[in-house]
Image (cartoon, rainbow, N blue to C red):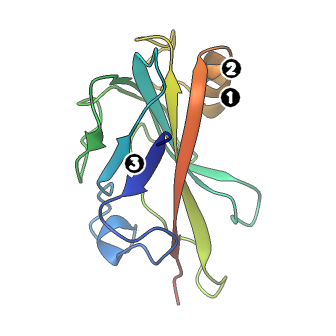
Amino acid sequence: MSFRVRPLSFNEGEAIPVRYTGDGDNLSPALAWEDPPSGTRSFALVVDDPDAPNGTFTHWLLWDIPGSLRELPEGVVSGTLGHDGVNDFGQPAYVGPCPPKGHGAHRYQFKLYALDTSRLMLPEGAKRFEFDKALHGHDLEESWATGKYERT
């Protein structure tokens, strides 16, 4: 087996239920993972929309997820399971899919990183470029799951 993340709230590659979007309850979906690489001490998560009109748009940054965990529950509250960075909405929390109406389906990538450190040296509320820089040299392996969402 190899390191793998999967959504529990929807099927891989399929539509993300409205409940987890900006049009619904805006809850983070439940995720599970298995077989992290040896030496994993923590995890970090990024949720991105690579189909955004102005380039990749970050919906969630979360790091210092304990290495003993194998699942994130639905509706993670900011600050309860690690540290939140500031997403491209300017908020330190999960903000669900909300692509422009009539723009077609967007893909949302849930990227989980297995890290060799229990703590990334980042301030609470760090931005994406700081997050990416802090991952450098600590990323043992990454896995991702994808869902789609379209506003009509």
- Residue that protrudes farthest toward the right in the picture: 54
Can the viewer see residue 12 in this picture?
A: yes
In the rendered image, which residue does mark 1 sit on?
129
**SS at mark 1?**
helix
Instruction: Give the number of the mark in front: 3 or 2.
Output: 2
Task: Establish if 38 lies above or below 8.
Answer: above
Q: Are marks 1 and 2 in contact (CB under 8 Å)?
A: yes
Q: Compute the Cα span from label 1 to label 2.
A: 6 Å
Marks 3 and 2, the one that precedes in the sequence: 3
Q: Secondary structure at mark 3?
A: loop
For disc 2, the marked residue is 133
Count residues near mark 2 (Cα–Cα under 10 Å), then give few for <14, some for 14-19, many for 20+. Answer: few
Residue 57 in the image, given as x and y percentages of width and height: 64, 53
Q: Along the line of sight, which residue is nearer the eye, 138 or 121?
A: 138
| Other residues around mark 3 within 10 Å, as few (<14) / some (14–19) / many (≥20) | many
Amino acid residing under circle 1:
Phe
Q: Is residue 89 visible?
A: no
Q: Which mark is residue 143?
A: none
Q: Position of residue 6 (x, y in %)?
A: 41, 55
Amino acid at dot 2: Lys
Q: Disc 3 designates what residue? A: 94
Residues tagged 3 and 2 counted as in contact (Cβ below 8 A)? no
Q: Quadrant location of residue 131? A: top right
**Residue drawn where x is 65% and y is 27% of the image:** 132
Disc 1 to disc 3, C-alpha distance: 17 Å
